């Protein structure tokens, strides 16, 4: 082991991953954690008859097709783990109508069409946008980004759907896809856009 040493503050998932990668590359590491259990947000505790789970809401990279999967697999054997993939990632209510944000783009499309058939021409574009998101050509990348951002600025339902689509795109193993996703999320979740579509 090398005489190079790195001190890491916090034994959450990020701190543990940094420590692992540093040791893989020949560094000595020491992690300092305030809590008596490592794991950060991925921990739980008991009080009386109840278990409190302070866990993260979702974990990217659990699908082998996603970019993060290969990094997780460097640290733990992903095939030994069993994941529950939820059909509905979340839901919101607007004026008494409940909109479910499905993880499957086709189900999301059908959900949105049942609520807002007037937006059909935009809703049908989401699967195509996901398909085109990995294209490295500059003009295609910009066109996909432009389309997703502008659909998401039309109304609240389309905004939520566009942000969800961008989060799906963010998981793809593609630099172009990650750029499209982060730029879209940044704009569509901005205070200015949210204020305008909620009027």
Image (cartoon, grey):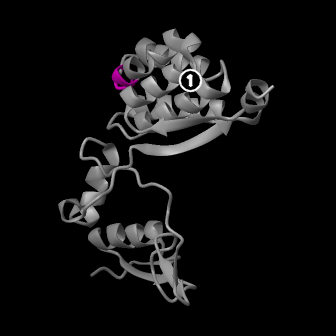
Q: Which residue is nearer to you in this view: 5 or 198?
A: 198
Q: Which element carries disc 1, helix, strand or loop?
A: helix
- The structure residue drawn at horizontal position 30% and vertical position 55%, both measured from the top left corner, is 71
Q: Which residue is mark 1?
A: 115
Please say whether residue 90 is visible from this viewpoint.
Answer: yes
Image quadrant assignment for residue 163: top right
Q: Which residues are magenta?
A: 130-134
Where residue 121 sits: x, y (%)?
50, 9
- The structure residue drawn at horizontal position 56% and vertical position 23%, both measured from the top left corner, is 115
Magenta stretch: dominant secondary structure = helix
- As drawn, 120 above or below 23: above
Q: Is residue 23 toward the left or the right of residue 8 in the image?
A: left
- The structure residue drawn at horizontal position 31% and vertical position 43%, both measured from the top left corner, is 66
Q: Which residue is nearer to you in this view: 156 or 168?
A: 156
Where residue 167 sits: x, y (%)?
47, 38
Please say whether residue 183 is visible from this viewpoint.
Answer: no
Image quadrant assignment for residue 24: bottom left
The quadrant in which the N terminus is found is bottom left
Q: Residue furthest left?
A: 79
Image quadrant assignment for residue 189: top right
Q: Is residue 151 toward the left or the right of residue 77 in the image?
A: right
133 magenta-colored: yes
Where residue 133 sits: x, y (%)?
39, 24
103 magenta-colored: no
Q: Which residue is nearer to you in this view: 133 or 57?
A: 57
The quadrant in which the C terminus is found is top right
Q: Residues within 10 Å of mark 1 (few under 14, many from 20)?
A: few
């Amino acid at each position: 082991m090398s005489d190079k040493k790195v001190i890491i503050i916090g034994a959450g998932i990020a701190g543990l991953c940094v420590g692992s990668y540093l040791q893989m590359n020949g560094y000595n590491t020491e992690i300092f954690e305030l809590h008596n259990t490592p794991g950060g947000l991925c921990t739980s505790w008991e009080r009386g008859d109840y278990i409190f789970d302070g866990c993260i809401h979702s974990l990217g990279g659990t699908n082998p097709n996603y970019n993060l999967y290969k990094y997780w697999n460097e640290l733990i054997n992903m095939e030994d783990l069993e994941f529950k993939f939820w059909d509905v990632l979340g839901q919101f209510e607007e004026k008494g109508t409940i909109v479910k944000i499905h993880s499957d783009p086709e189900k999301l499309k059908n959900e949105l069409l049942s609520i807002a058939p007037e937006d059909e021409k935009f809703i049908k574009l989401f699967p195509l946008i996901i398909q085109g998101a990995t294209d490295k050509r500059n003009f295609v990348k910009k066109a996909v980004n432009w389309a997703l951002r502008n659909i998401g600025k039309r109304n609240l339902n389309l905004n939520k759907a566009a942000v969800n689509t961008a989060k799906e795109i963010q998981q793809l193993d593609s630099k172009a896809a990650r750029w499209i996703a982060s730029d879209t999320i940044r704009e569509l979740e901005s205070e200015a856009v949210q204020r305008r579509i909620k009027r």
